[in-house]
Amino acid sequence: MLCGCGMMETVTSDEQVFDLLDQRLVQALMVDGRAAFSRIAAVLGTTDQTVIRRYRRLRGAGLLRVLGLPEGERVGLYESRLRIQCVPGAAVAIAEALARRPDTAWVKIYSGGTEVGCLVSSRTREDHEALLLRKLPRTQQVTGVTAQTMLHEYTGGANRRFGRDRLTAEEIAALEPGPVDGEGGAGEDSEDLVRLDDADHAMLAVLARDGRAGYPELAKAAGRSESTVRRRIEYLRGSGAISFHVEVHSIHFGFGIEAGISATVAPSDLAAAGRALAEHPQVPFAAAVTGAANLAATVLCRDQRDLYRYMTEGIGALTAVHRLEVLPVLRQVKRAGLLSDGSRLYDAP
């Protein structure tokens, strides 16, 4: 999956690659996860019923999900990327324990089997510090923890896709969400945090399970009218407080290898290098982080030769990168959604 929740699914050989229409549908949803099926059908050149049938089949089989998730830096979540060193044989148990936590967005075991990576997103500083300063250090099988604060994400909107060649530039433009008039917000400046209220948290709990949930369901959860909920969702999207992610196994697009990238870039070159990296079709995620390795990314490649070619020609073309560490993912235990099945980060107070 690119961007989800839950444990890794077994993918059989006959499921490994979607057909072209499946892939185009997935990429249309990556452009706008809440686009009307009629709009997607018109852009893809097929019928509404065909799009609906394909979406329901993929979602029903657990191969595709759309999630509406908050953007941490816009809504004030405390986020850290963790690299956890473990004693041999302990990585699976530690990764699975982290995956059960509602405040972990993804959990991975890296090649070698003694290091676990995860993203922690906490609603309060106290909860965040409790995990980093007390719980993990007291775990006997953990030998070391490195925490990086997420400073700025370069991949958002159109840059959160991968394998973009299934849609033309004209098709992408036709699917992009339209401008938002700003109604329904609380008047936050674009540089300020977006303050979420109880009704917002209730809506997010629904969207974290189904980003395409209808307005009647969202209105019921929030205790607001459908028109109010519609305006509020539009405002939250337009202000960058929430975004819609697509969960799908990258193997269905022919990408057999996922790797974590840690790069060291001079501070004066960081913004330009991050933006350039985010434009690479192999990169669904890139962000500036704290620490000596100040640029982090996720890379998807078809095989080892493709990964080598990307390291030497793709990242190699970024002359600002001074040091590079590549960590192939051995197992993905939890995907990119903030909520795992059966647990909720956004419980309405």
Image (spheres, grey):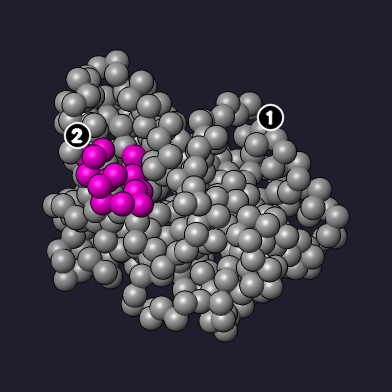
Residue 71 image point, x, y percent: 42, 60
Check disc 2 and report its element: helix, strand or loop. helix
Q: Where does the image place residue 223, in percent across and percent down from the top left?
A: 63, 61
- For this orientation, the residue located farthest to the bottom is 181
Check disc 1 and report the residue beneath it: 14
| Mark 2 crowd level (few <14, some 14–19, many ≥20, 10 Å Cα) | few
Residue placed most toward the observer, 219 or 341: 219
Q: Is residue 122 magenta?
A: yes
Q: Is residue 67 visible?
A: no
Q: Position of residue 32 (x, y in %)?
A: 61, 64
- Of 263 and 246, which appears nearest the observer? 246
Three-letter amino acid code at disc 2?
Answer: Arg
Q: Dot 1 surroundings within 10 Å: few (below 14), some, or many (20 or more)?
A: few
Is residue 83 left or right of 18 when viewed as pictured?
left
Camera-side residue: 345 or 244? 345
> Which of the pair 94/122 is nearer the observer?
122
Residue at image point 34% right, 61% down: 76
Residue drawn at (51%, 76%), measured in percent from left and top? 185
Residue at 83% x, 53% y: name it: 50
* 86 up-or-down from 232: above or below: above
Instruction: From this view, report whether residue 85 is shown above or below residue 315.
Output: above
Q: Which mark identifies residue 134?
A: 2
- Magenta highlight range: 118-132
Under mark 1, the amino acid is Asp
In the displayed structure, would residue 133 be above or below residue 149? above
**Mark earlier in primary sequence (2, 1):** 1
Q: Position of residue 168 (x, y in %)?
A: 63, 67
